[in-house]
Amino acid sequence: MSIMHKIRLVIKRIVFGNTLLPQEFTLGLEDPQTEITVWLHGAGAPRNVTRRHSMVCASPLTICVGFDEGQRPDENDLVNPSLKFCERTGRKRVLGEIGLKPQTIVAETGSEFILFEPRSSKNYCLPKARLGTHYLLHAYRQWRSDNTKGIKMTFLERRAGMVIFICPHPILLVSVGSKADGNIFPMNILGDLGNGYMGFALRGERLAGGLVERASRIALSSIPVSQGALAYQLANNHTKKSIDWSQLPFATKMSSAFSIPVPEFASRVMEVEIKSVRAIGSHRFFIARIVREDKFFGGLEFCSIHGFYQSWRLGTLEREDEELQISLAGDAFNKRGRNRPLAIRNAQIEMLPLDDKQNR
């Protein structure tokens, strides 16, 4: 290691401390997650919408909040509405806040939904000075190399997106179609919307969104964290019309209601029916009704959070440096399939045992 490289590492350590983590940080959590609550303010009394909100689109960044029929606040009732992301236990501190401006109202049987765009964003996971250095680094990296894969987001939208992922998002495998003409791919832009509804989003220009829209029925499989690398290996399937199921590195079985192929290792399978689809900016947003949910076993499920929130989580633990290295190793282990070609069934990926510490 050269002297200049050592100097750069020292400077990074001074400026960023232990907070220079991947923006998308993967880990294992119980379902449903019990770390964060999300509250809607500015619509009368604060409403717990932890399991009633979903990201809709990245550009323009849009958030959907679900309400029981007849309980949706009128536009006149919305006074500087915002979402506050709070720790569920302890001091219940606010870790992030997104100011909202209403855009569209959507109605389905028994429920109503408001689509919001951000008007402001605040992140309290890091001290202000350190957060500012991260924003500068982020802007510099975007200037040097645009890694948004064609999605153009404003600085406000990027900051709001960071806050949204303070709340852990499960990474699920989407199965669509049959073994004769079907596909399976990962997804993590989704959320419960209440009353048996859920929302999820897929990139508008990719084939996966069209497949789901035409099929109108899909199966969503939770991933045990020990199988997390498979999600990254299957990511390229977003651009395919169909796959050869016999080439997957895992066995499948048929879902209970729709007879759609799902992984045998799935800890939970939800079968959903698409109720509406909207093309909004960079994504297609789907509102679906859960038809059947089967829970096969418990344990840690594969999730993603923002790196700022992971830094905050680590700061609440004793032996922070040790826990940092353990969690970074777990994240790297989960992502090892990102640049690896899909293995065939007869050459399965070696799944090393993961204890709870590796996925904190």
Image: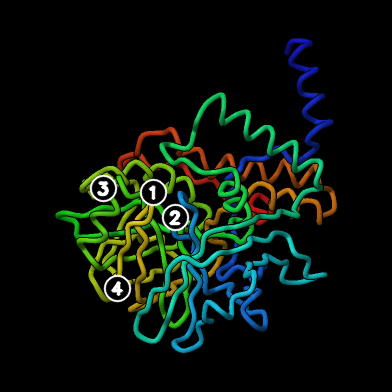
Name which of mark 3 and mark 2 comes first in the sequence. Answer: 2
Do the residues bearing badges 1 and 2 touch, measured as CB atoms within 8 Å?
Answer: yes
Residue 234: name its quadrant: top left
Dot 4 surroundings within 10 Å: few (below 14), some, or many (20 or more)? some
Quarter that holds the C terminus: bottom right
Give the Cα separation between the discs numbered 3 and 2.
17 Å
Q: Which residue is mark 1?
A: 282
Secondary structure under badge 2? strand
What label does residue 199 carry, if any?
A: none
Whole-number angstrom distance, CA of label 1 to CA of label 2: 6 Å
Kindly check if marks 1 and 3 are in contact, taking CB atoms under 8 A apart as contact: no
Closer to viewer: mark 3 or mark 2: 2
Q: Quadrant of the N terminus?
A: top right
Q: Earlier in the sequence, mark 3 or mark 4?
A: 3
Residue at which label 2 appears: 57
Q: Amino acid at mark 3?
A: Leu
User: Tag 4's secondary structure?
Assistant: strand
Q: Is residue 334 left or right of residue 106?
A: right
Which of the two discs, 1 and 2, labels the residue nearer the N terminus? 2
Residue at the spot 38% in from the left edge and 71% down from the top edge: 270
Q: Helix or strand or loop: what does disc 1 sit on?
A: loop
Give the image location of residue 350, x and y in percent: 46, 42
Q: Is residue 25 left or right of residue 92?
A: left
Q: Amino acid at mark 4?
A: Lys
Few, some or many C-alpha atoms within 10 Å of disc 2 (few <14, some 14-19, many ≥20)?
many
Circle 1 or circle 4, nearest the eye? 1
Residue position for label 4: 275
Q: Real-space Cα distance between discs 1 and 4?
A: 20 Å
Asked if residue 344 is positioned above or below residue 56 in the image, the reply reads above
Q: Amino acid at mark 2?
A: Cys
